[in-house]
Image (cartoon, rainbow, N blue to C red):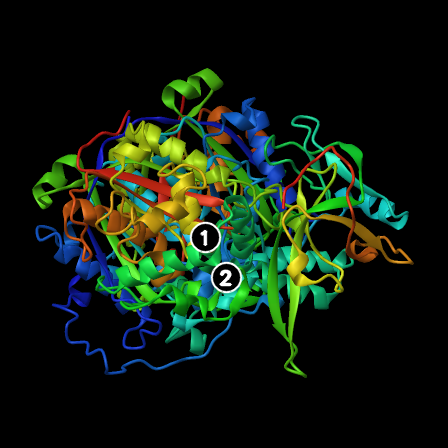
Amino acid sequence: MSKMTQRKSLDYIKKDYVRTRTLTGSWYLASYKFKFNITHMKPFLEKLKEKKLIGNQCSSCNRVFYPPRQVCGKCLVKPDKWVDIRNTARVSTFAISYLKDPETGEVQERPMVLVHHDGADTTSIAELNPEIDVKDVYVGMPIIAHWRDETVGGLMDIEYYDKFIDDSDDIRYKK
Amino acid sequence: MQKVGIVGYYQVKLYSDANYGRYEMIFEASRGALDKAGLKKKDISTVISCTNDYYDGRTISNCFTVEVGGGYMADESKVEMDGAHAVLYGLMRVLSGNHNLAAIWGGSMASCYPYHTVRLYETDPTWERSLAYVNDVTSAGFQMRAYMEKYGVTAEEIAKVAVKNKKNAAKNPLALKEAQLPNITVKDVLDSGIYADPVTELMVAPPCDCVAALLLAPEKQALKITDKPVWITGVGYNQDPYYLGDRDLSGCKSMNLAGKMAYNAAGINDPSSEIDVAELFEANAHEELIFAEELGFAKKGKGIEINSAINGDLPINPSGGALGGNPPCATGLIRIIEAVKQLTGEAGDYQVKGAKRAVASGQVGMCAQNNIIYVLEAN
Amino acid sequence: MGRQVAIASAGFSEHASKRSDVSMPELVSEAIEDCLKNAPGVEIGDIDAFVNGNMPAFEGSNIPELWMTDWMGARNKPLLRVTTGGTTGGTVAISGYYTVAAGLPGIDTVLAVAFEQQSQGDTSVGLASVAYGEISILNTLGIPYEQISRLLSAGAAIGVAAYQATTYMNKTKIKEEDLARVVVQNRRNAAKTWWAHLKMPNLTIEEVLDTPYVQYPLRYGMVCPASDGACAMLFTTEEKAKDICDIPVYVNGVASVANETAVLGYDGSGSCQIDPSMQLGAIRSAELTYSQAGISFPRKEIDYAEVYSPFPNQELMWVEKLGLFEEATAPEMYEAGVTAVNGELPVNCSGGVNATNAIGASAMERPAEAALQIMGKASNQVPKTVHTSIGSGWGGSLNLITLMAMSDQPRRKF
């Protein structure tokens, strides 16, 4: 260490003796502008208007991305094919958040689920029908997209996911 | 030090407000570098990124760049300094023998945030930041004044450096459009808006958007990948103390020590004659002179006497340097790429004839607190 | 190419939720001083290069080592800053290793420092801004802002860990008691570690299960604290280490492998990790590290492990993914006491991240503590002789895992 900063020991610092002063400062996230691409999302958003789901597919590793991705990380190429996705899905995993209403003080239990659509290789974050009991949610639960009556071509066209009885045999999840 | 080869590079054009998404730009750079080297994603064994949480507005700014930067299932890490420092970490990883191909990318988009305000977060929160008297712009003013006073250099002479670099930038198709000024004069530089007297607007490197990428491979591997690798034969880096009062601002001790370390590794005794071209990261015009002196290209205070034009004795910043565009986190990396272009003869209009050995530098902090310098040699 | 690297010493600062008696640079000095105290032959002037890192967003200071230069003794020395979020400490340790291993001329002894003073900033804001950019994109694609704020609250580190905990519990069919057992073991261990934060020598499983949920299935009592603290490690060459200390610890393998992000993808797209507890990155990291270190049977050859586990489910998961136990058997092993201090394979005898979490430093404290166990200088020293140990780190969006394998014999394969 240079001579100017050389000190013998830090032992002189007494633990109960507060010797610092607090200065306030902040990191303003609001002053940032985030730029992102919309071109690769366009066909997807247009199809949402027709209440149809599509994802894009990497022709190198054949993975299907829903919502569409700009780049396949595994192959480092742009996905170039579009494929249809079913509106049925599974709960890939979930967490329950406990949100306090600032006005009433009531604690709301809301499960946030990761939805794995049939025909896609990615999951997306979504909400369940608020009427579904939190205790009934499990990993692998079959769910189906519930569309809004009027679609505008945005992600909120799927209002929430509803429970449904899955009688297909192709994928079997256990509770 | 063993030789390490640069086998591929790519730089997105500099824009002051790019019509690019962040991830699109990173993808273009990392894919472009792979394509230039003719390699595949699976050949990459390690990825070093260079971003800054404050410049990206995100905590863990490399978190979501794994896919687009080629980091999927690769040994990945991030350096939070200049792009040139990221190359150093990539170089260490290759030299350690653990990795056969290191991909390094760095950059950010200065159009997304107020650059000079964000730079204020680099200052000491107790003293400088709350007063905001000392920041990257005013400290440049201190440094330029100290240099001028000590050696009797005039502002006109320093403006000449800006003129040279802006004219060089006009020949570089990838430089920032706003900085490409083929008809600029010394008077234009001195008459531009004052940032912190005597530093004027055209003497400060304009922040802009860019991502650049570089591929490193050990000697054997590099020769398999390309016939024309550029070798890194020396590297040096060093950090000065923070407080401006602790430093001699008319010089730059860290650059001097970094230069010695790099020359020692590369076996250079007389830098002014052995080096053919220099690409220095000058955040302000006067830094180019200070760096050139500290690197031994001229005596102290005589930096202005170097014939540093493209066809001169020792061309400095033929690409336009950082005055031709300064994308945070990428500038040092771009300096290395420009030096590589000179050594492989790919520089086009600003090619230095017969360049065999080059130096490229990067810096971090106020008044170039941390400097890094590379010695590069043609095959 | 490359050369064998050894750890000559490691040091810690004292950890607490608010170290208001020291400023950030003083905290760092404290760790450096403790580190050099353990290596009597080394003065701060003998150090050739420095590596450091923290999570800058948590303290509101960008590149803080610029103004902390003198406090670290790095004046006019080579210095490199490496940060990767939660794994920062691990990556700093790894880059300390690489700085020595590269064999750059004049660089033999390297001091790696990782630190965090979370009480200086707002950690929850810092963590939320990991995904702030990505999630706010969803707004322009039609998700209302109210839902985004819900997503943000679920998207912070505890949120992603909760998703992971759900899948892990579903796969292994464990109960909350199994999670609580891990917590109890860690915090009781922490009581014997001088620098640890949450020291609870008499904690019981019932007490942990009495606390309310933060986010199902994780309760307040299971979640790591937010601490202030720093950690330093001294890396040097094989020859020099023999002079400095009695038992040099040789670093035989390192890796930090990233998988695609979990829960949320870039630009608000989906995540490719369908099962967040699969952790291909950890498996690949372990493969790379063990192959470098010549470890063929990790279960038999590794004597001690420090894993990065802010949440108990992660501790169970990592020990399985890093090859220490068979899949889905870790809960039984914890119940049987295999991982206790006097067990066959002690895990996290320092109390782990679950008891002390100064985020930037945490991932370095793992290899540091693992190295001290080999040297026999750890404060909660295991009774058996430790020959080989590992220290891991976890960070990013459940996707980046660092791992360092150490031994008392130089066994790195070139």
Tell me the kind of residue under disc 1.
Asn
* Rendering quarter of residue B237: top left
Residue located at (21% from left, 49% from top): C342
Pinpoint residue B228: horizontal percent, then vertical percent: 47, 20
Q: Secondary structure at mark 1?
A: helix
Does B82 appear above or below B242?
above
Pinpoint residue B76: horizontal percent, then vertical percent: 45, 40
Residue located at (30% from left, 57% from top): B240
Disc 2 target residue? C218
Question: In terms of sequence position, does the residue under pointer 1 or pointer 2 come before the other?
Answer: 2
Does C135 appear above or below B269?
below
Q: Secondary structure at mark 2?
A: strand
Residue located at (10% from left, 45% from top): C244
Pinpoint residue B194: horizontal percent, then vertical percent: 54, 67
- Tell me whether marks 1 and 2 sit on the same chain: yes
Disc 1 target residue? C313
